[in-house]
Image (cartoon, rainbow, N blue to C red):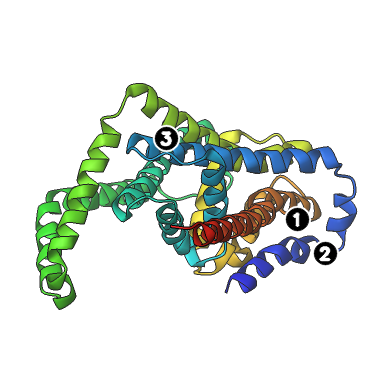
């Protein structure tokens, strides 16, 4: 599935622009590729910085180089699995091989994802407000009453979830207690949940400077990731609002995940091409998407494979030393 999904993502720009993509790509100099690769690395380093701080707040310190390698391998798992589901498991597993407990690694991965959620929950509405004019070209004309009804439906659904949260938690708890596997391991699971709560409390109530640093690293991570498309468009002479490009990528990439195909199987590329068609020609869009994919897919995959090899070799070396050292 990974090979099929990545293959479709690689082929999508060429399906859009054909041989004209290569002709346009020849005019792109190496400095541009270096900048795109640098943005990809900066995004990964920012994410590694978040993991490093979260681990340190729970009393675990890893060499930053190892944390970076774990981050790049995790990105490889996100990009090469359906809906990125393997990324969470791989991240937890690699942190555990570095000496952390299951509860600590789960808390760190969950806290890192929570930071991403906070960023998008704040950034997307602000970006949409700052880019109303270009977004109006993409949103179909719908009566205002429909928007009001949809908004009320979303608010009522959210209110129902909030009011019924205790009931749903009780139903879920009763359902789990009825499972024999859960009953046999209830004490261990209860201890795991208690550890999670204590560690989450430690992170949330950490120093203000630490929390601000985590937020700034999250902003840096996603601005460098989502800023690639804006920068490439600017390089080709299309000065679109940054907020518009951010919202466009957030929506298209999220929808592409629902295909269940790794890397979206080219659906994200086709969605972006359709949205950008009002501003640029198809061959130009195809080249832009190829450069965008270089920074957000091809280069991260190469970094992930290289980091996986490094982690594997390091682990085998440590095991050999431990085996040869006399007790």
* Residue annotated with mark 3: 53
Secondary element at tag 2: loop
Inter-mark Cα distance, 1 to 3: 39 Å
Picture disc at residue 286: 1
Q: Secondary structure at mark 1?
A: helix
Disc 3: CA contacts within 10 A as few (<14), some (14-19) or many (>=20): some
Q: Are marks 3 and 2 in contact (CB under 8 Å)?
A: no
Q: Tag 3's secondary structure? A: helix
User: Which residue ends up furthest to the bottom in the rendered image?
Assistant: 180
Q: Is the Cβ of the residue at disc 1 closer than 8 Å to that at disc 2?
A: yes
Q: Quadrant of residue 14?
A: bottom right
Measured in 3D between alpha carbons, the distance from the residue under mark 3 to the one under mark 2, in whole angstroms, is 46 Å
Tell me if residue 68 comes above or below residue 2 in the rendering: above
Q: Position of residue 156 (x, y in %)?
A: 21, 50
Q: In what quadrant of the picture does the C terminus appear?
A: bottom left
Residue 129 horizontal/vertical position (percent): 47, 33
Q: Residue at position x 50%, y 62% from top?
A: 323
């Amino acid at each position: 599935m990974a090979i099929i999904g990545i293959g479709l993502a690689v082929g999508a720009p060429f399906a859009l622009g054909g041989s004209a993509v290569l002709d346009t790509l020849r005019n792109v100099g190496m400095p541009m590729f270096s900048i795109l690769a640098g943005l990809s690395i900066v995004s990964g380093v920012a994410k590694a910085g978040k993991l490093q701080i979260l681990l340190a707040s729970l009393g675990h310190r890893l060499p930053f180089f190892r944390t970076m390698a774990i981050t790049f391998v995790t990105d490889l798992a996100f990009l090469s699995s359906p809906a990125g589901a393997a990324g969470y498991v791989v991240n937890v597993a690699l942190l555990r091989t570095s000496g952390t407990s299951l509860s600590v690694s789960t808390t760190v991965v969950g806290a890192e994802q929570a930071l991403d959620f906070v960023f998008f929950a704040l950034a997307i509405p602000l970006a949409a407000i700052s880019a109303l004019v270009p977004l109006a070209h993409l949103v179909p004309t719908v009566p205002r009453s429909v928007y009001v009804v949809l908004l009320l439906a979303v608010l009522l659904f959210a209110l129902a979830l909030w009011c019924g949260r205790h009931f749903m938690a009780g139903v879920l708890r009763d359902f789990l207690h009825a499972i024999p596997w859960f009953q046999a391991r209830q004490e261990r699971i209860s201890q795991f949940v208690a550890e999670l709560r204590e560690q989450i409390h430690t992170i949330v109530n950490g120093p203000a400077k630490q929390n601000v640093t985590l937020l700034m690293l999250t902003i840096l991570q996603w601005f460098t990731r989502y800023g690639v498309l804006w920068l490439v468009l600017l390089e080709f002479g299309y000065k679109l609002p940054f907020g518009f490009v951010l919202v466009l990528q957030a929506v298209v990439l999220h929808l592409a995940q629902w295909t269940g195909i790794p890397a979206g199987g080219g659906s994200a590329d086709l969605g972006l091409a359709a949205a950008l068609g009002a501003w640029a020609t198809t061959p130009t869009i195809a080249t832009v998407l190829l450069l965008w994919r270089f920074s957000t897919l091809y280069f991260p995959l190469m970094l992930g494979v290289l980091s996986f090899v490094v982690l594997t070799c390091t682990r085998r070396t440590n095991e050999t030393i431990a085996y040869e050292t006399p007790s």
